[in-house]
Image (cartoon, rainbow, N blue to C red):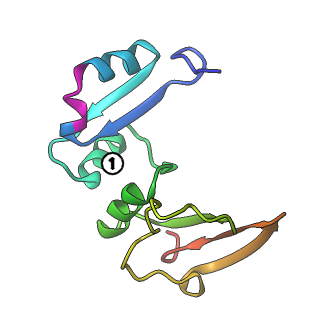
Amino acid sequence: MSATADSAPTPTSTPTPWAKRDAVRRELEDRGAQIEVAGDDSLRAALERLGARDIDSLLLEGGALLHAAAWDEGLVDFVRLYVTPHVLGPGGVPFLDGRTFSWADLIDGSVEPLGPDVLMEGYVHWPR
């Protein structure tokens, strides 16, 4: 089931190079996405554009490269990490590859078993 602008408008902010993909952009906008083009290639600039629209909370759902970029720019406030015992294989991208991350460092951290998986979550720094 796909969302439309009437059912769930989805503001999206994206670094400039991706936004230059005009065909993809038009297709997303035709389906109701509202795309904000950031002034540079940083996630921070993209989030600042969303902030200007009074969007103050964002679920960053993506792969390891997107999460690493947000971590590197200091944009992560809260972590919700689902861990599975399943192996991704040799082509998998490591989570925060080479960066320091420890569940024990999260503030108000919790762990919840979900069958064979585990949900770990907590704040990276004290909430404001």
Q: Quadrant of residue 28?
A: top left
Horizontal and vertical percent position of residue 57 = 49, 50
Query: Which residue is rendered at x = 32% and y = 16% of the image?
Result: 26
Q: Secondary structure at mark 1?
A: helix
For the view shown, which residue lies furthest in the left direction?
Answer: 40
Q: Which residue, given by chain and number where applicable, does mark 1 sit on?
A: 47
**Magenta span contains residue 19:** yes
Mark 1 crowdedness (10 Å alpha carbons): few <14, some 14-19, many ≥20: many
Q: Quadrant of the N terminus?
A: top right
Magenta stretch contains residue 38 = no
Q: Nearer the viewer, residue 73 or 98?
A: 98
Image coordinates of residue 48 in percent, x first then y, are: 29, 48
In the image, 103 versus 108, the foreground residue is 103
- What is the residue that sits farthest to the right in this orientation? 115
The magenta stretch is: 18-22
Q: Position of residue 35 (x, y in %)?
A: 33, 28
Q: Residue furthest bottom?
A: 104
Q: Position of residue 33 (x, y in %)?
A: 42, 23
